[in-house]
Amino acid sequence: MDLEELEPRKSKDYEIGGDLSNLSIEELKALVAKLTSEIVRIEDAVRAKESSMSAADSVFKT
């Protein structure tokens, strides 16, 4: 028997579109929380870039 077989399974990072069948309910809930916070972070980045673009447009408009 391999020693690796005795160690607890380490869950891999989720890949968008990946198989969800091997995740437990707790892992799925944690994934939802992680993805939700990532969505907020991405939306913040979009707003910041839009703000910068709007400011640059107002400076260079003639």
Image (tube, grey):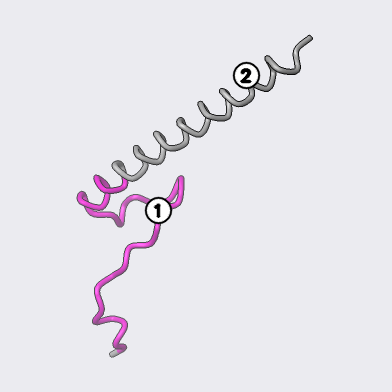
- SS at mark 2 in the image: helix
**Amino acid carrying mark 2 in the image:** Ser
Q: Could you say where residue 19 lies in the image, as x and y percent from the top left?
A: 39, 51
Q: Taking 3 as reference, is 44 left or right?
A: right
Depth order, front residue of 22/27: 27
Residue furthest out toward the front: 59
Q: Is residue 13 magenta?
A: yes
Q: Taking 22 as reference, is 50 left or right?
A: right
Badge 1 crowding class, 10 Å Cα cut-off, few under 14, some 14 to 19, many 20 or more, is few
Residue furthest out toward the right: 62
Depth order, front residue of 31/41: 41
Q: Quadrant of residue 39?
A: top left
**In this figure, which residue is indicated by the disc labeled 2?**
54
**In this figure, which residue is indicated by the disc labeled 1?**
14
Magenta stretch in the rendered image: 2-31
Q: Could you say where residue 54 lies in the image, as x and y percent from the top left?
A: 62, 19
Give the residue displayed 79% in from the left and 9% down from the top.
62
Q: Is residue 61 above or below residue 22?
A: above
Give the residue displayed 24% in from the left and 73% down from the top.
8
Q: Taking 29 as reference, is 38 left or right?
A: right
Which quarter of the rendering shows the N terminus?
bottom left
- SS at mark 1 in the image: loop
Depth order, front residue of 33/59: 59
Residue furthest out toward the bottom: 1
Q: Earlier in the sequence, mark 1 or mark 2?
A: 1
**Amino acid carrying mark 1 in the image:** Tyr
